[in-house]
Image: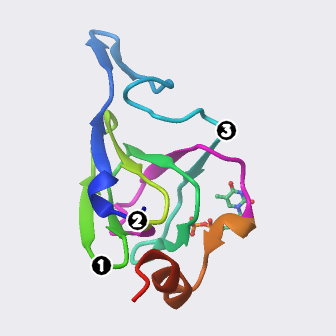
Amino acid sequence: MADVSNCKLVRLPRLSDGRGSLSFVQPGPLLPFEIRRVYYLYEVPKGQFRGAHGHRKLEQLVVAVAGAVDVEVDDGQQRRTFRLDVPDVGLYVSPMIWRNLTGFQPGTVCLVIASEPYDEADYFRNYDDFLAAAAPR
Ligand code: TYD
């Protein structure tokens, strides 16, 4: 169920030569889900945050393809923060995790690869509702 220890940094392939670098993401051991959606965050003003929600089923891989961002993941009992600041490392975010994206460097482009199409019914928008589902007492 919800467990931040399932959220892990994933080192992506990087092919670099005199022409520059190329990284790629495809389903396989590094990405344990089929890709059904890709979106990206950009032009995030200094001091702004994104996220602040949880997902019931969605799995994601988050990559700062340019710039840097802090991704805080929270399973209702434990929190961890990962700084993403290179284009060849992604953060796998498992289901039932509340996430906050903060500390966007100017010019950051944050790519998100997702296991499902957009579905508002999959969101927890309220932290208390998330807590009740993720870590019932
Ligand atoms: P939201 O998921 O709240 O963004 P963030 O986590 O970056 O703060 O989505 C913001 C708005 O964009 C919301 O109205 C839903 C819409 N949206 C889509 O239509 N499709 C998508 O794939 C995503 C991620 C969001």
| Disc nearest the viewer among 3 and 1 | 1
Tag 1: amino acid? Gln
| Residue bearing mark 2 | 2
Secondary element type, mark 3 = loop
Give the distance between the C-alpha atoms of the residues marked 1 and 2, in whole angstroms: 9 Å
Please report the residue visible at 34 percent of the width from the left and 61 percent of the height from the top: 105
Secondary element type, mark 2 = loop
Secondary element type, mark 1 = loop
Front-most of 131 and 9? 131
Q: For the residues labelled 3 and 2, say whether their Cβ atoms are less than 8 Å apart.
A: no
| Residue bearing mark 3 | 36
The tag on residue 67 is none
Quick check: 15 above or below 71? Answer: above
Front-most of 24 and 104? 24
Please report the residue visible at 39 percent of the width from the left and 89 percent of the height from the top: 137
Tag 2: amino acid? Ala
What residue range appears in magenta? 98-119
Please report the residue visible at 37 percent of the width from the left and 71 percent of the height from the top: 75
Give the distance between the C-alpha atoms of the residues marked 3 and 2, in whole angstroms: 22 Å
Looking at marks 1 and 2 on the same chain, the residue that comes earlier in the sequence is marked by: 2
Q: Is residue 85 left or right of residue 41?
A: left
Crowd tier of the residue under label 3, counting other residues whose Cα lies within 10 Å: few below 14, some 14–19, many 20 or above: few
| Residue bearing mark 1 | 77
Q: Is mark 3 within 8 Å of ligand 1?
A: no
Membership of 112 in magenta stretch? yes
Query: Where residue 123 sits: x, y (%)?
Result: 63, 70
Quick check: 96 above or below 108? Answer: below
